Image (cartoon, grey):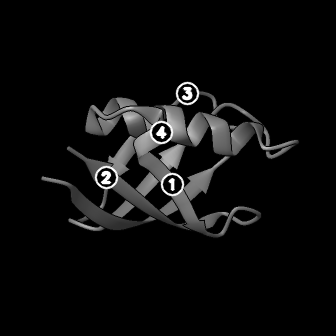
Amino acid sequence: MLLSMKISVRVKPGSKKEEVIRVDDTHFIVHVKALPVEGKANEALVRLLSDYFNVLKSHIQILKGTRGKDKLIEVTER
């Protein structure tokens, strides 16, 4: 069975430490050390979310907001 959920994420690039903060069931704030250059912050975001939700990185997809701080993310799990 394939489960999927969509979450809203506010990314804080250039942070001193990396962490995922759950605001409520569908809203998160993610601090990443990487700067938003050449997709590095998005890569760090996917890595952190895959660790947080314990899913493969391929199961994290940025649906909207690849070039901004506010993103809509789909997390799928089997």
Q: Residue at x 70, y 62 (%)?
A: 66
Q: List x then y, in percent, for residue 41.
A: 70, 41
Q: CA distance from mark 3 to mark 1?
A: 23 Å
Q: CA distance from mark 4 to mark 3?
A: 24 Å
Check disc 4 and report the residue beneath it.
58
Q: Residue at x 80, y 46 (%)?
A: 36
Q: Quadrant of the C terminus?
A: top left
Contact (CB < 8 A) between labels 2 and 4? no
Instruction: State the mark number for residue 24.
Output: none
Residue 41 is left or right of residue 2, and the answer is right
Check disc 3 and report the residue beneath it.
17
Q: Amino acid at mark 2?
A: Thr
Query: Of callouts 1 and 2, which one flags the residue occurring earlier in the amino acid sequence?
Result: 1
Which residue occupies the extreme left position in the image?
A: 1
Q: Amino acid at mark 4?
A: Ser
Which mark is nearer the camera, 3 or 1?
1
Determine whether the residue tagged by mark 3 lies in a helix, strand or loop: loop
Check disc 1 and report the residue beneath it.
61
